[in-house]
């Protein structure tokens, strides 16, 4: 396998060198340094679509000025169309393309005839499956809406006045529409298979028609009507042309409840067309009066702010309706409010979300119960199971539930009511301490079920595994561990997941077809794509020392397009056929880069105090001269080395005051090290890893050890704060919106989520061994404020005054501690800004001040006025 990977590397290295070789005339260009006025020239590539036979590709170029443009380009002739103000469009075979701009102008392109038809005032559009029809909702001359059906040339065939919305079925050969005029509403179905056949299914309704929904096979449809006093459900069978309705809930099952409409519980038809799932709620809205005094009780399930929010919220719940039998009953209730459906919607899983509260994790453990949807009788499925939704998955055929508990993946056979452990049969670890969401032990991802539901796909650290529901020996489909290459299924638009409520989804993969895998070399930073072939196994598509991303596959060809970039090479859009050795460049963005000096990137490796080998991405200054030693800026936030090959568009509008290209263009090295954490010593771990990475760069003889700066935002700002209390390596620091007082942070209520921040310290980023009272010494040792007397590094602190994530008082506390100790520090507080800066003026101000701060302390440049103290100004005025 190693020899195979070497061959892949060698082949694609030659290929990519061919792609990026400059013409001889380019070697004689006179280059210059970037200026901030040049930044407006840069655009960001966004791949949109590839046509069915790969004859055309659409992509957008986005600019900071918002003068965005969508392009449609022939991969054969290079012919191109450009549409300002558009970002995405739709192909219909190889013949048609349409896109909608930000002024509601629809551009219809007949690609064969090279004809563009513009249609104004369009709100919604779709092609029929065979491309014979274009359907739009648009505004007519009197400003009312109309549904229009056109042929492929844009010629109007039929119109329905006052139609305001439509929904295509999955086959895109029929649509469900609604219209309204003078407080009367109509719903209908239009068949587009051959001729246009329209059929009204509800007429003269006095309530507005909403939530148009099709079944999976397109044989049935559902919607609801809504006015100020009532919501009714409707179910239409296209085969029998029968319309059923549910106008009120049976009070035997729904005591004082009403039908409602809510995006969290959308209308959904069962796959077998027998039932409709809908939302209901209390008929009387809960009212919570603001008391004279808030009463916080230690034994309440939630703390007061969350309880007040809940009591003011009439939570929608899940129910089922059987149109043929005219029966309906609830699935979730106020007590068992969490609910999800199995793959075939025959069973539901419910849970009491408050049962194990109060607790101090991100996701409370739940006792899950399973019940047959038609009967509604519950029985225990699994107890004390994490409420993290990614740990429970439902097979598409409805036979199995897979869940992760106590470091083991389990399979539950619904019919046999039997639990079987899947993963102990292998010697591989299925959990990680490196997860970005929850820093406790967490499983590597469950990915998907097979098409027939008889097998499932799991990830370990590097590889993809196929497990079988009948207990057969699992198969490892990739060989990433041997080469430190991580394989994952590429997130393609074709891989659609089924929504099962409570944010759970079921994804199905057909392993009898070719599947695209994304690959990442965890040591070198190379990336690319492989084809997982049903007979041939793993086959390389493209793998190189670059960032290769955003793949699209042509529906009817083995052709793929993807973006290729490096830090020193702006993104290009490439086209490649599976069996063709060559790769075709569709577009190379930002050609003006050749006129400017640019840096390059390199992956370096270093050791922490525990002798673990870690990665860091190092970015060289533009126009680098090895005869000089340059200042170095370290940017930190857990693990960032994966950004090695990211092309960074120069900008002074970063929301965090950090832009790699902006810094390298001004003569700085930039270092992004990975940090590996020892539980209970998060801050100490950060110090050890960052110092190890910086020493590695200094030993190369390229950076000045007396001119090293460090900066971070949010958790990276906390890391910056704690590092400068324990290291004398840094000549300047910048800390944005970070925690400085761990004890205060631990006992803070997050006003965005209305819960205590305790969980972040015990079970998330701060990685403490337990509660504050179990390990006070660790909390104090890793708290910047309690160690501020050891700071010798000048620090620029900034925060948004409206930050509800990390309270601005955290920045103020560190500033006041340093002020009391007479340590050099300046704090910037931005009014009307939150955890990141969103206004352009604030972004420009922060970016310029960060640069001026580092220029003063790392380059020795003359200080700007805001950098000098009041006493210094007075002394300058009175020499």
Image (cartoon, rainbow, N blue to C red):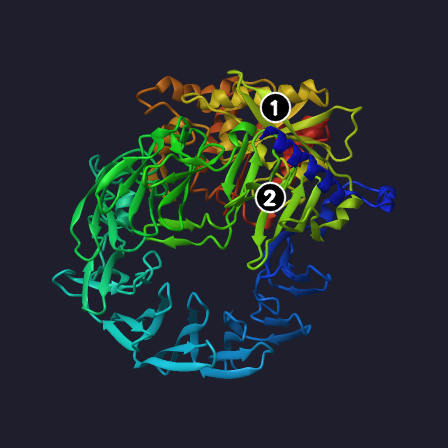
CA–CA distance in space, label 1 to label 2: 28 Å
Q: Check the image and report above or below for 69 versus 22.
A: below
User: Which residue occupies 61% across, 66% down?
Assistant: 94
Helix, strand or loop at mark 1: strand
x and y percent of residue 731 in the render?
63, 23
Other-residue count near label 1 (Cα within 10 Å), few / some / many at <14 / 14–19 / ≥20: some
User: Which residue occupies 76% across, 43% down?
Assistant: 18
Q: Name the one closer to the observer, 542 or 80.
A: 542
Per the rendering, the mark at residue 654 is: 2
Q: Name the one closer to the observer, 105 or 603.
A: 603
x and y percent of residue 408 in the render?
33, 32
State the quadrant of the N terminus. top right
User: Which residue occupies 29% across, 65% down?
Assistant: 273
Q: Is residue 510 left or right of residue 704?
A: left
Residue picked out by circle 1: 605
Task: Give the mark, 1 or 2, whose residue is nearer the N terminus.
Answer: 1
Please give the count of numbered marks on the rendered protein: 2
Can see residue 734?
no
x and y percent of residue 718 in the render?
49, 29
Q: In this view, does 185 lie to the left or right of 560?
A: left
State the quadrant of the C terminus. top right
């Amino acid at each position: 396998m190693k020899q195979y990977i070497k061959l892949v590397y060698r082949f694609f290295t030659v290929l990519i060198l061919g792609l990026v070789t400059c013409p001889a005339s380019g070697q004689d260009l006179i280059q210059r340094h970037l200026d901030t006025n040049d930044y407006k020239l840069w655009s960001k590539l966004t791949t949109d679509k590839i046509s069915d036979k790969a004859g055309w590709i659409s992509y957008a170029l986005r600019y900071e000025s918002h003068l965005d443009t969508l392009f449609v380009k022939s991969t054969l002739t290079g012919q191109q169309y450009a549409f300002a103000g558009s970002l995405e469009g739709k192909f219909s075979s190889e013949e048609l393309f349409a896109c909608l701009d930000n002024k509601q102008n629809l551009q219809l392109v007949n690609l064969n005839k090279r004809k563009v038809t513009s249609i104004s005032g369009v709100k919604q559009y779709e092609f029929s499956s065979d491309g014979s029809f274009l359907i739009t909702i648009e505004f007519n001359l009197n400003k009312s809406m109309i549904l229009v059906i056109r042929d492929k040339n844009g010629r109007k065939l039929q119109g329905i006045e006052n139609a305001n919305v439509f929904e295509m079925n999955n086959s895109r050969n029929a649509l469900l529409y609604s219209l309204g005029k003078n407080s009367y509403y109509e719903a209908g179905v239009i068949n587009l298979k051959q001729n246009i056949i329209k059929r009204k299914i509800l007429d003269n309704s006095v309530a507005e028609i909403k939530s148009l929904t099709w079944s999976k096979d397109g044989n049935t449809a559902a919607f609801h009507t809504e006015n100020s006093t009532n919501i009714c459900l409707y179910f239409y069978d296209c085969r029998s042309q029968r319309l059923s309705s549910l106008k009120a809930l049976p009070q035997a099952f729904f005591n004082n409840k009403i039908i409602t409409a809510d995006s969290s519980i959308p209308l959904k038809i069962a796959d077998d067309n027998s039932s409709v799932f809908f939302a209901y709620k209390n008929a009387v809205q809960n009212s919570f009066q603001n008391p004279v005094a808030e009463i916080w009780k230690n034994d309440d399930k939630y703390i007061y702010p969350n309880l007040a929010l809940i009591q003011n919220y009439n939570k929608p719940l899940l129910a089922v309706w059987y149109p043929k039998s005219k029966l309906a009953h609830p699935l979730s209730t106020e007590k068992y409010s969490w609910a999800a459906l199995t793959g075939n919607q025959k069973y539901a899983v419910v849970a009491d979300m408050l049962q194990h509260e109060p607790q101090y994790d991100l996701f409370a453990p739940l006792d899950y119960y399973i019940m047959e949807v038609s009967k509604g009788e519950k029985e225990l499925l699994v107890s004390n199971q994490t409420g993290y939704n990614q740990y429970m998955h439902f097979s598409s055929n409805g036979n199995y539930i897979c869940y992760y508990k106590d470091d083991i993946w389990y399979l539950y056979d619904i019919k046999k009511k039997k639990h079987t452990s899947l993963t102990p049969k292998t010697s591989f670890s299925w959990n990680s301490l490196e997860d970005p969401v929850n820093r406790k032990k967490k499983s590597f991802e469950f990915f998907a079920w097979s098409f027939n539901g008889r097998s499932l796909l799991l990830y370990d650290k590097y590889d993809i595994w196929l497990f079988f529901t009948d207990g057969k020996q699992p198969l490892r489909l990739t060989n990433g561990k041997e080469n430190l290459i991580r394989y994952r299924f590429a997130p393609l638009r074709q891989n659609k997941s089924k929504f099962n409520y409570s944010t759970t989804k079921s994804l199905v993969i057909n392993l009898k077809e070719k599947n695209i895998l994304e690959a990442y070399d965890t040591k070198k930073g190379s990336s690319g794509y492989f084809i997982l072939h049903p007979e041939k196994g793993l086959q390389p598509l493209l793998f190189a020392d670059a960032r290769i991303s955003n793949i699209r596959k042509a529906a009817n060809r083995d052709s793929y397009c993807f973006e290729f970039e490096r830090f020193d090479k702006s993104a290009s859009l490439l086209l490649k056929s599976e069996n063709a050795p060559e790769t075709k460049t569709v577009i190379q963005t930002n050609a003006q880069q050749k006129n400017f000096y640019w840096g390059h990137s390199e992956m370096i490796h270093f050791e922490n105090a525990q002798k673990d080998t870690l990665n860091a991405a190092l970015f060289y200054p533009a126009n680098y001269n090895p005869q000089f030693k340059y200042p170095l800026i370290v940017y930190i936030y857990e693990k960032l080395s994966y950004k090695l090959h990211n092309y960074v568009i120069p900008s002074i509008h970063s929301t965090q005051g950090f832009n790699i290209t902006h810094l390298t263009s001004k003569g700085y090295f930039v270092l992004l090290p990975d940090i590996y954490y020892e539980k209970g010593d998060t801050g100490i771990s950060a110090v050890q890893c960052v110092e190890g990475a910086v020493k590695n760069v200094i030993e190369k003889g390229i950076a000045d050890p007396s001119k090293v700066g460090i900066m971070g935002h949010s958790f990276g700002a906390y890391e910056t704060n704690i590092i400068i209390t324990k290291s004398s390596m840094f000549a300047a620091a910048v800390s944005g919106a970070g925690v400085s007082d761990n004890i205060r942070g631990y006992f803070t209520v997050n006003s965005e989520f209305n819960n205590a921040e305790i969980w972040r310290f015990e079970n998330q980023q701060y990685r403490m061994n337990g509660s504050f009272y179990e390990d006070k010494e660790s909390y104090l040792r890793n708290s910047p404020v309690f160690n501020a007397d050891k700071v010798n590094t000048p620090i620029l602190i900034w925060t948004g005054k409206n930050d509800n994530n990390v309270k601005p008082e955290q920045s103020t506390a560190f500033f006041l501690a340093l002020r009391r100790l007479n340590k050099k520090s300046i704090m910037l507080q931005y009014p009307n800004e939150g955890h990141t800066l969103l206004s352009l003026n604030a972004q420009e101000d922060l970016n310029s001040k960060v640069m001026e701060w580092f220029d003063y302390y790392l380059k020795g440049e003359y200080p700007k006025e805001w950098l000098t103290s009041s006493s210094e100004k007075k002394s300058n005025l009175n020499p």
